[in-house]
Amino acid sequence: IDARPNLYLSETPEPFSERATCQKKIDAHPRGIGGMALHAKKQIVATASDDCSWKIWNLDNAENIMTGEGHKDWIAAIDFHPAGSHLCTGGGDKSVKVWDFINSSIAHTFADVHTGPVWKLRFHDTGDFILSASGDGSVKLFDLHSLKMRQQFRGHTDSVNGLNFQPFTNFFVTGSADKTTSIWDMRTGLTVQTFYGHLNTINDAVFSIGGQYVSTCDADGIVKMWDIRMVQELLTIDTGDVIAHSLAFDKSTKSLAVGCSDAEIKLINIEKGELSGSLKGHDDAVTSLYIN
């Protein structure tokens, strides 16, 4: 279906507090965490690590609920199925695995689907498809019913590092090391729009909750925000002498959080178009973040 109700728009969220403090720390893995995912309905988080494992944690008591092993190399990509029953992972071994963590088993492995590492994975909101973004410059769409690749998206000339669906639609955004950001139609396999302006590798690309804005960040610490309806750049923020790794809009679309290489989360006030503070608590680069 082309248009589905955006469940987030029925909410009236409070803007993210710039005075937020670290509430809990979980020593999750012995090596770096390349990605994480929040469960849609429960207070649990999944982490993917360079130690070749993924883990699920209870956010209330920091209990390790489950550990998954099966990848032959580091894991960077991870996402929860919208129904909350499955998990997908990908990484350095170029494969995509789907896990049934209710039954503690691997549901399916898409082996050697890319010629480069898998950096990002995203479930479609219907739960029927998975998108994978790779270091080989391609994005691929997998059908979970037929267990086959349904579509291949080629247009980037370098690694695809950022990948996110426009909420409750059939469109998605990519950010690449070729310094471009593209919006794609999942059904046709074609590019809808491409944005130019970054001067270095784009590390992440995310949609706002309403889907009208895209934000991107790069290895120079530059963050940009784009209006996809007007097809124009709205603002550019320099976060300093850092690498900007990851992004998250708050649900009010008034704040933008940026995970950086200096172990800080920089906060951007979108209405004022300026940095408004930072959150400190990590000891190394912030590679993944969410605002719930």
Image: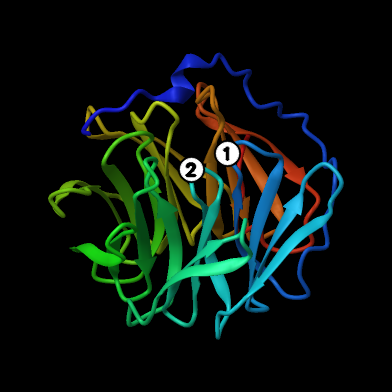
Above or below 259: residue 243: below
Q: Check disc 2 and report the residue beneath it.
A: 82
In this view, the residue in front, 264 or 119, is: 119
Above or below 8: residue 95: below
In the rendered view, does 133 fall on the left or right side of 75?
left
Residue 198 seen anywhere in this rendered image of the structure: no
Image mark for residue 40: 1
The answer to the question of whether label 2 and label 1 lie on touching residues, with beta carbons closer than 8 A, is: yes
Above or below 71: residue 209: above
In the rendered view, does 185 fall on the left or right side of 201?
left
Residue 162 occupies which quadrant of the picture?
Answer: bottom left
- Amino acid at dot 2: Pro
The secondary structure type at the circle numbered 1 is: loop
- Amino acid at dot 1: Ala
Label 1: how many residues lie within 10 Å, few (<14), some (14-19) or many (20+)?
A: some
In the rendered view, does 23 fall on the left or right side of 277?
right
Sequence-wise first label, 2 or 1:
1
The secondary structure type at the circle numbered 2 is: loop
Q: Which percent across, then down, holds residue 3? A: 25, 28
